[in-house]
Amino acid sequence: MSKKKKTIDELLEEALVPEEEQPYTIPEGWIWVRFGCLIKESKLGLVRSSKEQAIDKQFPYLKMNNITIDGRLDLSNLVRVDLKKEELYQNELKDGDFLFNTRNSVELVGKSTIFSDENTDEPVLFNNNILRVRFLRNVNSYLVNYYLNSPYGKSSLNNIKSGTTNVSAIYAKNLNTISIPLPPLNEQKSIVEKVEQLFKRIEEVKQLIVEAKETFEFRRAAILNKAFCGELTKKWRKENSLDFNWEEKRLEDLIEYGPQNGLYKPQKAYGTGVLIVRIDNFYDGKINDWQTLKRLQLDTREMEIYGLKNNDLIINRVNSIEYLGKSALVRNLIEPCVFESNVMRIGLNGEVIPEYLIKYLNSSRGLQELRKNAKHAVNQASINQQDVKNVLVPLPSKEEQEEIERILNVLFETEQNAMSHFNVLEKLEILKKSILSKAFRGELGTNDPSEESAIELLKEVLQEQVK
């Protein structure tokens, strides 16, 4: 006995969100509908083990990391898999397909994007942590994706997550219950175009900021290079009737105590107790705010051996090569603090000004010296205590060290003030969220009151299911 088809009224009742359940008021002509009622078809992707993925396989294979947290598709790290030719039609992606990450960590599950075939000329497949959705005609997939990446859309997805912190899931049956604001067809297109136009402008601003920062970094590197070859204080020496009289000394000759490697403690020791500086707590000569550091339990002997003092120098001895050798000066120590095993500590004698030395070690020349004998392994490199002792330091008189320090402080303060005007990346992300919020409240100026209500559009597409 064949199953009786539902009437248009029954389908409408299932699709429309009752007034008492509607999240907020939307413009006249819009309707709140259930996500599931907009779907023509949906499918989870292919299961392929890591052994079945390789660069010499047949087809590109999208995984959950190819969907970015802000709703874009990243094709830069695609793996490839094999597939029988007769299975290809059912499993390949088409332009405009909506992709939803159903399983991930609790922070990342629920990412979504739209597949575009503009950047590929071959069939692309997707894995079983991704749900492919094709919507009914007259439903703009880009609009749905923008909504689910809006603040309210993300909040709705958070409410249907299940699982643990490490592995969380959003099941299709729960995704289908999500409420979606559906504008009339032309307005759907207008909203997508307006959002894309505004987002494009934001990306252009971001690019300008990146370019400006790169210019500042290049200029900073050039200034430091001049500082440590004596060119920056050339005029000062002439004014003070001084000759160029620099020495090149090994760092070992400037050390009072150390180098000393830090201490290792298991994870269970962390939580309360004494502050500890770890490799992610310092950069460009400075330690992060003390209040952001982790704490761990230590005994009195450990505190005596590994306790830091003001003007101690710390150096990262194990890391990826681009971070290896980064260093910082201990300043304004407010309470007892120690340093971890991937860091070494040095105490300086009175022959070098600490602020002069830390700026040198963070210059391209200083970092090159620290890394010149680095030992390389998979994904990381290391330096030892003797490598640090052998670092060559250009050393003028203490008076010239002080003058170099003074000039650099003036120049960098000026540049830092200029850079502060470019420190708006976080604000741009907030602006994008604001744009999406306004878009789905009809506040982007896209409304056309004369356009036929979205309810008529919904009836039209649901009518096909009645026939």
Image (spheres, rainbow, N blue to C red):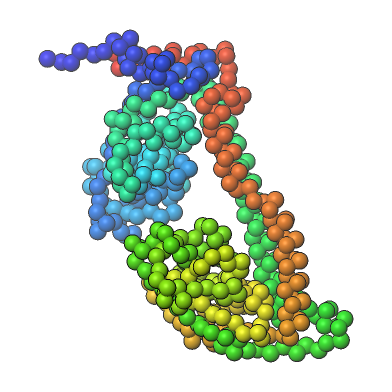
Q: Quadrant of the N terminus?
A: top left
Q: Quadrant of the C terminus?
A: top left
Image spot of residue 234 (x, y percent): 80, 80
Which quarter of the picture shows residue 411?
bottom right
**Extreme left residue here?**
1
For the residue pair 202 and 305, the one nearer the viewer reads as 305
For the residue pair 241 and 306, the one nearer the viewer reads as 306
**Extreme front residue here?**
300
Q: Determine the residue positioned at 42% across, 73% down.
A: 300
- Residue 147 appears left or right of 3: right
Image spot of residue 193 (x, y percent): 56, 31
For the residue pair 377 and 299, the one nearer the viewer reads as 299
Q: Is residue 49 above or below residue 330?
A: above
**How many labels, in total?**
0
- Residue 217 appears left or right of 126: right
- Residue 264 appears left or right of 146: left
Which quarter of the picture shows residue 227?
bottom right
Image spot of residue 269 (x, y percent): 36, 64
Image spot of residue 148 (x, y percent): 44, 33
For the residue pair 460 and 318, the one nearer the viewer reads as 318
- Residue 169 appears left or right of 256: left
